[in-house]
Structures are given as C-alpha cells and as structure tokens.
Image (cartoon, rainbow, N blue to C red):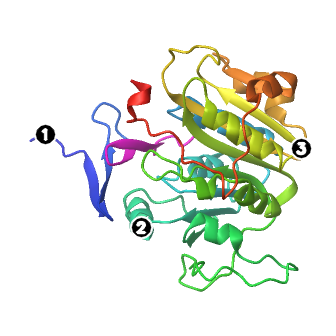
Amino acid sequence: MPRNHRVFSLSLDNRKAKLVESKRRPGRYELSVDGIPQSVVSMTDPTELEYAYIRHIARAIDAAAEPGEPLFTVHLGAGALTLARYVEAARAGSPQLVVEFEPALYAAVIAALPLPAGADLRVIFGDARAVADAELPGEGRSPSPALGAEATDGSAVDSDWVEAQFTVVDLWDAAVIRHRVASQEFYRRVAARSAADGVVAVNLLDGHPFEYSRRQAATLGTVFENVAVVLEAEPTDDEGPLSNVVVFASDEPLDIATTPDLLGTPRPHMLHGGRLTSWIAEARIMTDADGTDSPDPDDPIWD
C-alpha cells in the first residue's frame, strides 16, 4: 500500500492549510495555505533551507552574533517555524519569540513537527500590529486592547518582545501582506522593540518595477539608519517573474552590505548606499493613511 504523505489538512476561516511530507525526500515538509507555499522544513537537518530568501535571512542571522552565541530572535508570523528551527540548530538554547495569528495552525504544526527538546521558544497568539502597538515599559500609555495574547503555558502576557536582536517580519495573509503591518507606524514599533544594534529582515514578493518593495525600502529608511535590499531578480528586467525581495534594516551597519560574500553563490543583487537611493527614486513612504497591500500574485498585471 502506498504511504500516505499528507500530515494534516486544516480549515482556517474559509482558508485551507496543508502540511505535506515530500514523497521523494522523507523528512521534508511543506506548509501551504490555499495552495500557496508558506514554509518548507527539513526535520532531518533544520539548517537545510529550501528557498533562497530564507537562506539570505539565515546568513544575516549567522552574522548577527558570534557562532553558537545565543541570539534573541523574534519571528512575526510562524509558518512551520523554519527559521526558528534554524536558529535552534545553529544557536541551541537561543531565546526566541513567535507572534502568530492562527493558534490552531501553530498547534497543528507543533503537534506534527515538534521542536527539539530544550528549545526556548515562546509564542504570543494575536495580531502582530496589536502586539507591536502594546505599551512598552516607560511609555506611560495604555496598551492595545486588542492584544489579548497568551503564552504557550496559558499565562497572560503583556509582551515579551523587548530588545530583540533580530526580527523577521514575514506577515502573509495567504499571498498578500496587509498594509497595517507594513507602514511607517508599524516599523517604528518594531524599532522600539529592537535592541540598539538589532537587525530587522522583511520578506516581500514583488516584480518589476518593484513599486511596492521600493516603497517599503523608503519607509524603513525613515525609521532605521541603514537599509539594504536583496533581490533574486534582475532589478532592471521588466519581463522578470515575481520573486522574493528581502529588505534588511538596522541602526548599525549591516553585515550583508559590508560583507556581501556572506550571501554565498550564486550572488543575489544587493542594493545599498547610493545604488539603493537611486533604485528607491521617488517612491513614497507607506503610512497607515497612505499604505497599500502587497501585490497579489494572481493579479492580471503580472501575466
């Protein structure tokens, strides 16, 4: 009898999430929502990363602290915890925090693909914007009433998201990023919760002329001192396909910009400094009042 490689199929507010094991590569699992791949995990080797953009973020994580040194990492959007598993494999015992909107999906993923024993990972269930907007110590303002977060042990929390050394922003609603978690106001809250030398990595999907990504880079540039963009696609190819774009930001110089060899080969396109300024050009920053959702891959403009 053929082996059943389906791990689970879960309904989430009129959407369907599936976690499926590869038939050809046992131990490799893909999480999809409405047929759109969200995460790929190797349970045999969590440092084996399927997608190039994930590898770029992982290399930046590698450079954020000395090898093996604990690194407080925050993941906005859990998926199948690909990067959280990577951090645990590379820096065992690192404190990590996940902000996840779908408790049922998180529970199903953890049940199917448990984290290693001893992993120090906490989760806040709630809307990432509400969590970001919650009061920080010393701010003297009321926390967001929408927070209502709970830790994995069921205890109420205000937020454990303080002094993050590395923050991954991977907040997809199926194939779209909503503008409320891509605005200047949102990124200011991310910055307020980051360490002085903290790094933020934002995963996007875009294509030429990269209007959305250029606006995101411009927006992050109003919040952080240093911004760099990593593109898989040729920046000037007006017939190129949609591809992942990763925007890195920090108040300190970015290692991936100062040491581009970190990204390995084949080398993606790196934009920073004057080249990034030229690429951004006149792109408008995104605010809560003047933001847009990310491009929908199914939109006819991409055909």
Residue on which the image places disc 3: 225
Residue on which the image places disc 2: 107
N-terminal of the two: label 1 or label 3?
1
Which element is circle 3 on? loop
Q: Which residues are magenta?
A: 28-47
Which element is circle 2 on? helix
Disc 2/disc 1 C-alpha distance (Å)? 28 Å
Q: Residue furthest left?
A: 1
* Disc 2: CA contacts within 10 A as few (<14), some (14-19) or many (>=20): few
Proximity of marks 3 and 2: CB atoms separated by less than 8 Å: no
Q: Residue at x 54, y 53 (%)?
A: 178
Task: Tell me where residue 107 sits by quadrant.
Answer: bottom left
- Res. 288 in view: yes
N-terminal of the two: label 3 or label 2?
2
- Amino acid carrying label 2: it is Ala
Q: Position of residue 166 (x, y in %)?
A: 75, 51
Task: Tell me where residue 234 sits by quadrant.
Answer: top right
